[in-house]
Image: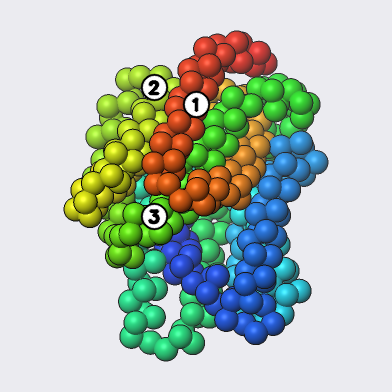
Amino acid sequence: MRPVNALIATHGLSSFGLGLVFPYTAIYLADQPAVGTTGVAMFYACTGGANVVVALLLSAHVIRLPKVTLGVLGTVLWFAGYLLLPAAAAPPVVALAALMIGAGQGCFMAAIIPLVNALVTAQERRSVFARRYAVLNVTLALGSLAAGVLTLVLPRTVIPWFFVANAVGILPMTLAIVVAGRHLPPEEDDKDTGEGGKSGGTLPALGLWKLAMPAAAFQLAVYLFGYSQFEATAPLVTEKLMGMELVTISIMLVLNVLVIVVGQRPITRLLEKHPETTGLRWTVIAWVTGFLVAGVCAFGPTEVKFAGLLVYAALFALGECAYSCSFHPWLISMVPDHELTRANALVNSMMGIGNFTGPSIGVALVLTGDTSVVWFGLAASCTAVMVLVGLLARRRPAATATLPA
């Protein structure tokens, strides 16, 4: 098996483990008498905060580690954090577990994209990143489904074992990273640590941030007005404002994954002949259309509302397909190879900020009590993102021109 395929397969196994705990982390912590809902909020704040801090330290070159070392460190911290979580019966233990999980995410996410990129050719890049995205979505969904079935047939005490399974599930990824490191070109370590070589000297933090800022800004916007809204706001407005049954949300999620599985390969092939920014525009257009369809259908009877929500879920998935084969290749083309780990860390920090603050935007819209305000407000926000993509596309030649020889 090619090292890159082993990385994708083991990452999928880890994603399955994450799917096991994804629906039940908050429930488990809230059930602990000394933790409660306040402890749940603290857990997510510590996780997100540690992720962002590590990512910013990496992008500023305060932390300098080769991508293999960084990836291994991330998986070990992830393992330790989730292994500790079943014993998190008090706030200090919850905070410690959350900090390890968040720091592990920050290290791992900064390393994995440069590592995958170093193992493939430029011609393979889009298809490999698209395949990786599809695998992660499918395995996450399967993990959530497995957890749901297990909690139906087993007592609630099975939940702590989900955390153990998630922790153990990252260990094959650790091995795959080590093995992949043996197949990297010799100069890759110099690139990571800024030794230079043929890649040129290390850029100062401000220089790197300026170079990668278009991609970082787009990533922030995508998670503020796209992913976080699908995960947090759409379920709220579906149940609270549109009066739909909870099963509707599950159907939307299943449809979303199915469309990604079916649509990822043809969309990737279709976009291979176009610049990466074309795929990013398609992403935003699909999401805006989905928001508008859901908003218009919200005025109809239950059947029309249901159909509109399914169309929204399908269009969101098609946008995800375009995003997955376009964004990271776009980022890779913007920065020198030896700065990719730092640039990816910066982009990852924007993803963390978007995931952390995005739901607040959706909740504020939901609190208006007006379904049209929610859907059309999100459509307007995504339209602004589309304008941003156009501006970034025009700026890109100027940015790439600044790359060192």
On the image, numbered disc 1 is attached to which residue? 384
Q: Nearer the viewer, residue 325 or 373?
A: 373
The disc labelled 1 sits on which kind of residue?
Ala
Regarding residue 13, the answer to whether it shows in the image is no
Q: How many marks?
A: 3
Write the residue at 44% across / 27% down.
Answer: 383
- Measured in 3D between alpha carbons, the distance from the residue under mark 3 to the one under mark 2, in whole angstroms, is 34 Å
On the image, numbered disc 3 is attached to which residue? 241
Pair 1/2: label in front: 1
Looking at marks 1 and 2 on the same chain, the residue that comes earlier in the sequence is marked by 2
- Measured in 3D between alpha carbons, the distance from the residue under mark 1 to the one under mark 2, in whole angstroms, is 16 Å
Q: In which quadrant of the rendered image does the C terminus lie?
A: top right
Viewed as shown, does residue 292 lie left or right of 233? Answer: left
Determine the secondary structure under disc 3.
helix
Looking at marks 3 and 2 on the same chain, the residue that comes earlier in the sequence is marked by 3
Q: Is residue 312 above or below residue 20?
A: above
Write the residue at 68% across / 47% down.
Answer: 52
Q: Is residue 290 above or below residue 242?
A: above
Q: Is residue 248 above or below residue 31?
A: above
The disc labelled 2 sits on which kind of residue?
Thr
Regarding residue 371, the answer to whether it shows in the image is yes
Write the residue at 53% across / 80% down.
Answer: 160
On the image, numbered disc 2 is attached to which residue? 278
* Residue 147 x %, y %: 39, 73
- Measured in 3D between alpha carbons, the distance from the residue under mark 3 to the one under mark 1, in whole angstroms, is 25 Å
Determine the secondary structure under disc 1.
helix
* Residue 111 x %, y %: 60, 45
The disc labelled 3 sits on which kind of residue?
Leu
Pair 3/2: label in front: 3
